[in-house]
Amino acid sequence: MKNNLIIFTGPSGVGKGTIVNQLFQELEDIEFSISCTTREIRPGEKDGVNYFFKSRDEFETMIKADAFLEHAEFVGNYYGTPRNFVDDTLASGKDVFLEIEVQGAIQVMQKCPEALSIFLIPPSLEELERRLRKRGTESEEVLQERLAKASEEMKFTGQFKHTVVNDDVSLAVRKLKTLILGARKG
Ligand code: 5GP
């Protein structure tokens, strides 16, 4: 059995979070990498659980200290994957799961070509808009930016080892689980 770095990406609002929650209830020997971000904390989120919430100054100091495996600016905020957690978890023999946006995912694929990379696709851009509106966490302006970003991001699907369409959550979770368990067999 071999443990892996898993890169899970897809446009904002595609449903990555829902799938991750379900997946983590069903899998063992896998750790979720908690990212750092400079965006505002949303109601219900907790520092150190959903993200490590940082000021721009703190984040930029971490960039200078080479503390990130990857980082990207997404719709006006920084997001980054702390390097130490990934290294330590991989050394401990467990899988590490990164749920990140597309530019960061591409950076990690370049640094770690052996990683299992998965792109989650919405059934359509119209459905993506409907889901983002239903979530209701963004202003209209940010929502429009996230939608514009989504159609840009969709152009990169071909660079990922696997694509999964999120039209049915349980089916998507099952596909992801199969890919992750399959990668352990090498
Ligand atoms: P949100 O603000 O909705 O939590 O996240 C916005 C986007 O940033 C999502 O696509 C999410 O997957 C991505 N993201 C979360 N953490 C990271 C990270 O560490 N690095 C990068 N590049 N993207 C991230």
Image: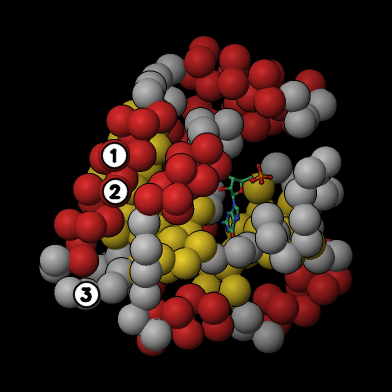
Q: What residue is pinned by disc 1? A: 174
Q: What residue is pinned by disc 2? A: 177
Q: What separation in Å lies between label 3 and label 1 (alpha carbons)?
A: 20 Å
Please give the label number shown on residue 2: 3
Q: What secondary structure is found at the residue carrying circle 3?
A: loop
At a point 52% along the width and 53% down the height, the residue shown is 100
- Residue 125 left/right relative to 144: left
Q: Residues within 10 Å of mark 2 (few under 14, many from 20)?
A: some
Q: What secondary structure is found at the residue carrying circle 1?
A: helix
- Residue 171 left/right relative to 65: left
Q: Earlier in the sequence, mark 3 or mark 1?
A: 3
Q: What quarter of the picture does the C terminus occupy?
A: bottom left
At a point 58% along the width and 36% down the height, the residue shown is 12
- Residue 67 left/right relative to 102: right
CB-based contact (under 8 Å), mark 1 and mark 2: yes
Q: What separation in Å lies between label 1 and label 2 (alpha carbons)?
A: 5 Å
Q: Amino acid at mark 2?
A: Lys
Residue 136 image position (x, y, % from top left):
75, 24
Residue 16 image position (x, y, % from top left):
50, 40
**Is residue 9 among what the camera can see?**
no
CB-based contact (under 8 Å), mark 2 and mark 3: no
